[in-house]
Image: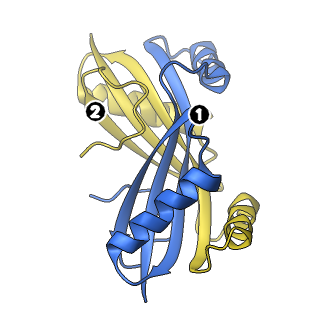
Chain colours: A blue, B yellow
Amino acid sequence: MSPYVAHVTVMLKPLVNDPAGLAVRDGLSALGFDGVEAVRVGKRLVVTLSAPDAEEAARLVNAMCDQLLANPVIEDFVVEIVDGASDTTAAAPPS
Amino acid sequence: MSPYVAHVTVMLKPLVNDPAGLAVRDGLSALGFDGVEAVRVGKRLVVTLSAPDAEEAARLVNAMCDQLLANPVIEDFVVEIVDGASDTTAAAPPS
């Protein structure tokens, strides 16, 4: 079993209303950022887990998304497996 | 002025407590996912804006993060500018 880090991005589907995004857009306008056309707000999860290999890690994290991390009715999710477990808290996406 | 899409990732700094992440980790354990060691929960924002060029777009979005989108005291953020405004709602990170 090796440690893996999964970066999970969960966003509302394009046709689903995003009131948080509208509030952020209006807040940015109020602050004087005039060029902002749209904002969508989603979640980013960094999951550190043990798995026999990267494929199994990806399978597990996809199952986690289906069961808990995302609502497949209204949200899309993307899972990226990052080898090694050095950056469990990183904001940065893998390069 | 061209349209740009910025992908913003906001995560709590590594030493900051993340109760949401702990709750998700415990929830995954309750569902039978035994190999999960840690979960950190952050935000992903997709900002569509007009700017004269990509550098100015990046400068604007970094200013937005400092002023509204992130709390620099407890959060780190990463801004990526994606050319073109075709995927304002995409969950996928840029390849």
Q: Which mark is residue A65?
A: none
Q: Residue at 39% of width from left, 18% of height from top?
A: B49
Distance between the alpha carbons at the discs numbered 1 and 2: 27 Å
Relative placement, left or right, of B50 versus B72 is: left
Sort mark 1 into few (<14), some (14-19) or many (20+) by Cα contacts within 10 Å: few
Which residue is located at x 56 percent, y 40 percent? Answer: A72
Element at label 1: loop
* Residue A68 horizontal/vertical position (percent): 65, 54
Q: Which mark is residue B82?
A: 2
Is the residue A16 above or below the residue A58 in the image?
above
Residue shown at the point (38%, 32%) measured from the top left: B6
Vertical order, B4 against B36 (above or below)? above
User: For the residue marked with disc 2, what is the amino acid?
Assistant: Val
Classify A46 as above or below A53.
above
Query: Which chain does tag 1 point to?
Result: A
Q: Check disc 2 and report its element: helix, strand or loop.
A: strand
According to the picture, the residue beneath numbered tag 1 turns out to be A73
| In the rendered image, the vertical position of residue B90 relative to residue A68, given as above or below | above
Judging depth in this view, the residue of B75 and A63 nearest the camera is A63
Q: Nearer the viewer, residue B55 or A63?
A: A63
| Image quadrant containing the N terminus of chain B | top left
